[in-house]
Image: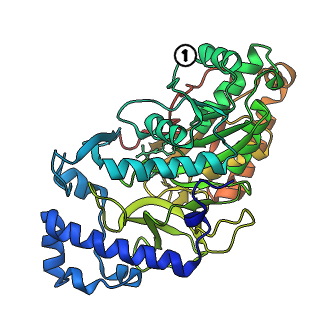
């Protein structure tokens, strides 16, 4: 039920002790080995000795993605080549990619996070773990891969792509737990249905899905399409990779591996730390990391923290499903819109989660068009009512988002499918 009960169910006092000790060590590492941090601390008149416990974290400066870009590729590393054992990088749709590095110890801690996630999703040493996250510089594939091996489970490193082959392997190799993005899980479910295979015919029992924001409704769709329990997993390459936090049997918020990755929620404008339960920007400090010890890294992800003992028995603080990223947030005629809100409306009206949001500017005015794919059934049964359904979705969208949008129902299989992270927004204003 737990992978490391001594940590996952530790008392708050014990956890603070671990965090305080690790933070002090980390700050010394930053000061002595990363010129970028030494300069920052000196400018603030801050010495490593000023950090005596985890409460002193608020004295430390923030780090942002641009700092990694400015110091590309290895400028923020605290160790030399002799201690590094692995490099990963984030795809980086804008600007340079972000390069991250790990020592042997870092690899172990990251793998422990992924192992905790697998066990929390019900995985055991007897399970076949089907890893369909991409392998390579992206942390998804290799993150779950090492996690599965640490659990002692049987890892099937399929990587992404070739959907019919994925389904064949799932059936023939008896995969128990599937690991991929939620949008790819949905696509696998859709392909099963098209091939006339019942979800009961595949042995899968659970899935560990993350790397992008997904709604509760999407969880229900996936669970139905694949006949499994769907668990969320969160992570980012700058901090480690998948397994920074993970869901348990309660499927309600992700336990943060706070012994390695200390979370805070801040107001992105004032940079003040917000109390538990309030939405804000998630910030992590890599208190257990040697190679890339980032201090108060601003993730841009919008979430909130819950610090109650969970029914699963874990005491680790929970972060609730990220609502999206502050940089994914669209501002449509002055109104803030998250793609996840659009997804919520679409799914709550019984449509399938194949949609794309297109934002344009006409005569200096923002316009938002939501293209939603019809299911085969809908397409044949209700073709005469398309205009009425579009109107219904559009008015639901207006009342939820507070801004008008055009809704366009499109034919089945006309929107692009993704084997990794889905592209939900096409913002032509920036092109
Ligand atoms: O996506 C690591 C990962 C791989 C996580 C596999 C989970 C599973 P990056 O490519 O660096 O790393 O992207 C990190 O993805 O800041 C979030 O915006 C988003 N993200 C990751 N997991 C979730 C999740 C990997 N469960 C960025 N829910 C993060 C919402 C997520 N967003």
Residue 100: where, in percent of width, then height? 29, 47
Identify the residue shown where x is 15% and y is 63%. 33
Q: Is residue 44 left or right of residue 179?
A: left
Q: Is residue 134 left or right of residue 48?
A: right
**Residue 187 in view in this figure:** yes
Is 385 located above or below residue 265 in the figure?
above
Identify the residue shown where x is 51% and y is 42%. 150
Quadrant of the image occupied by residue 63? bottom left
Quadrant of the image occupied by residue 136? top left
Q: Residue furthest right?
A: 381
Identify the residue shown where x is 46% and y is 30%. 134
Q: In front here: 44 or 29?
A: 29
Is 57 located above or below residue 84 in the figure?
below
Residue 148: where, in percent of width, then height? 54, 38
Give the residue number, with chain letter if any, for mark 1: 162
Q: In front here: 140 or 393?
A: 140
| Viewport quadrant of the C terminus | top left
Residue 200: where, in percent of width, then height? 83, 25
**Residue 355 in view in this figure:** no
Q: Is residue 387 left or right of residue 403?
A: right
At label 1, counting other C-alpha atoms closer than 10 Å, the crowd grade (few under 14, some 14-19, many 20 or more) is: few
Secondary element at image label 1: loop
Q: In front here: 221 or 48?
A: 48
Identify the residue shown where x is 46% and y is 47%. 111
Q: Is mark 1 within 8 Å of ligand 1?
A: no
Q: How many marks?
A: 1
Give the colour scheme of this rendering: rainbow
Is 106 located above or below residue 90 in the figure?
below
Residue 93: where, in percent of width, then height? 35, 39
């Amino acid at each position: 039920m737990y992978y490391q009960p001594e940590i996952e169910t530790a008392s708050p006092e014990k956890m603070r002790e671990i965090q305080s000790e690790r933070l002090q060590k980390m700050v010394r590492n930053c000061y002595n080995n990363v010129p970028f941090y030494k300069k920052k601390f000196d400018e603030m008149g801050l010495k490593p000795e000023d950090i005596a416990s985890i409460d002193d974290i608020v004295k430390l400066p923030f780090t942002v993605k641009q700092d990694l870009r400015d110091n590309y590729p290895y400028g923020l590393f605290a160790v030399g080549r002799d201690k590094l054992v692995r490099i990963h990088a984030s795809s980086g749709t804008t600007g340079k990619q972000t390069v991250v590095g790990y020592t042997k110890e870092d690899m172990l801690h990251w793998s422990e996070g992924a192992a905790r996630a697998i066990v929390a999703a019900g995985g055991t040493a007897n399970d076949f773990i089907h890893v369909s996250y991409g392998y390579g510089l992206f942390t998804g594939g290799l993150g779950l891969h090492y996690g599965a091996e640490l659990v002692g489970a049987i890892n099937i490193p399929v990587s992404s792509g070739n959907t019919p082959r994925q389904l064949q392997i799932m059936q023939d190799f008896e995969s128990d737990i599937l690991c991929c993005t939620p949008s790819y899980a949905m696509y696998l479910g859709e392909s099963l249905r098209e091939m006339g295979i019942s979800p009961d015919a595949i042995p899968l029992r659970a899935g560990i899905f993350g790397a992008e924001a997904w709604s509760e409704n999407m969880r229900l769709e996936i669970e139905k399409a694949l006949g499994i329990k769907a668990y969320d997993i969160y992570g980012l390459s700058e901090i480690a990779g998948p397994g920074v936090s993970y869901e348990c049997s309660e499927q309600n918020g992700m336990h943060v591996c706070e012994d390695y990755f200390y979370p805070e929620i801040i107001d992105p404008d004032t940079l003040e730390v917000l109390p538990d339960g309030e939405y804000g920007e998630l910030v992590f400090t890599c208190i257990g990391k040697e190679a890339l010890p980032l201090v108060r890294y601003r993730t841009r992800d919008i979430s909130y923290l819950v610090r109650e003992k969970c029914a699963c028995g874990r005491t680790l603080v929970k972060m609730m499903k990220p609502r999206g990223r502050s940089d994914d947030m669209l501002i449509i005629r002055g109104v803030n819109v998250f793609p996840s809100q659009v997804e919520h409306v679409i799914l709550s009206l019984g449509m399938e989660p194949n949609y794309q949001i297109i934002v344009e500017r006409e005569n200096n005015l923002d316009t938002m068009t939501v293209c939603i794919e019809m299911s085969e059934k809908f397409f044949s049964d209700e073709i005469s009512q398309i205009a009425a359904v579009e109107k219904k979705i559009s008015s639901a969208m207006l009342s939820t988002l507070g801004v008008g949008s055009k809704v366009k129902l499109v034919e089945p299989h006309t929107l692009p499918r993704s084997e990794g992270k889905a592209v939900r927004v096409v913002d032509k204003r920036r092109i």
